[in-house]
Amino acid sequence: MVELTLPASWYVDVSVWGRERRAVFGREWLFVGHGQGLSEPGDYVACDIAGWPLVVVVDDGGELRAHHNVCRHRAGPVVDEGCGRVPSLVCRYHGWSYGLDGRLRAARDFGATDGFEPAEISLRGALVEGWRGLVFVNLDLDRTAPPLLEALGTFVDECEPYPIEELVVTHEAQHDVACNWKTYADNYLEGYHIPLVHPALSKDIDVKRYVVDVDERHRWVRHSAPARDGAVSSGCWLWRWPNLALNLYPDAMNVERYDPVTPYRTRLRYSYSFRRPGDHDANEAVIRASAQVTTEDIAICESVQRNLQSGTYDTGWLSPKHERGVAAFQRWVRETVDN
Ligand code: FES
Ligand SMILES: [Fe+2]
């Protein structure tokens, strides 16, 4: 039975976006970043995923903590987006200061008043866990989130042969893309478009032997294709619901985090890690090949998004041969949002 795509309205409607924010991004384990920059108390990384402003910080005892980056006074940010090291979390608006554990320490120059107990006020928290040097958070809106390893399930075994911890991050990139996060994910989850959209990649890999495997239970997808001689693009491209792409090569790794921004905008955060960080020429070749593919993907995804918004398309057909990954992803979206 040929499956149909999600209707175009799912890529456009603000009401779907609101449901996805809570049902997908409010409940699932979300990839945040590498733990390499989170070693000393006060080290933090702050991000905004689907309109959830979050900060992961190392507390005074050396443990990772996750807080909503939303001050309890009048919703200012307690750190700017990005990463760094701070002694405490001081709101950028009026200067309320929170400990790294999220507890309010001082409400700057607030004035004495009844019914205001600073000792009882904390930033709202989220769950945080690390796996092989990668950090994930879960907003756990239902208070039913399984531990990270249980949620990752067979994805853990799949990554086992790769030396993820031995690689050093040397390069980061960010791309703002004018499309819904699902438009980008759909595109990532099939190799059907490669001969048309990626002519150079198409020469590097054996497209006829391109394989997509889907793990329905733990919601991840693997693409693999043998490289032709001398190409840098061989490897295993993994994608894990809902916002992580992990491209593993024998001596390198490229990690992508999807940050949905609005129904029509997605920010991609890339990092590149290498086993031999000093091997600039070889590493640059990997980064260049990846950047080329990304530029091509962004262009086609932005065109598709415009067409989804045009009102002239509702649903289409998914190829049983090439688009099983897309069909699975769209099923997961539907199941999660409709639940
Ligand atoms: S909003 Fe944070 S101190 Fe006012
Ligand atoms: Fe692509």
Image (cartoon, rainbow, N blue to C red):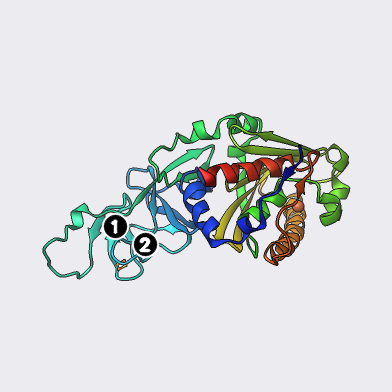
Q: Position of residue 218 (x, y in %)?
A: 58, 34
Residue 36 seen in the figure:
no
Up-down relation of residue 158 to residue 61 (above or below)? above
Q: Nearer the viewer, residue 229 or 120?
A: 120
Q: Can see residue 69?
A: yes
Residue 78 is marked as 2
- Horizontal side of 31 relative to 118 (left or right) equals right
The picture quadrant where one finds residue 153 is top right
Mark sitting earlier along the chain (1/2): 2
Question: Would you call the spot at circle 2 few (<14 residues within 10 Å), some (14-19), or many (20 or more)?
Answer: many
Using the image, determine if residue 312 lies above or below residue 146.
Answer: below
Residue type at numbered disc 2: Val
310 above or below 245?
Answer: below
Q: Secondary structure at mark 2?
A: loop
Q: Quick check: 216 above or below 106?
A: above
Q: Which residue is mark 1?
A: 98
Residue placed at 20% from the left, 58% from the top? 118
Q: Quadrant of the N terminus?
A: top right
Q: Separation of disc 1 and disc 2 at Cα?
A: 8 Å
Asked if the residues shown at circle 1 and circle 2 are in contact, with their CB atoms under 8 angstroms apart, the answer is yes
99 vs 53, nearest the viewer: 53
Q: Secondary structure at mark 1?
A: strand
Specify whether tag 2 is near ligand 1 (CB below 8 Å). Answer: yes
Q: What residue appears at the point 85 percent right and 37 percent down from the top-left corner?
A: 209
- Residue 308 image offset from top left, x and y in percent: 69, 61
Q: State the image coordinates of residue 206 (x, y, percent, origin top left).
A: 87, 41
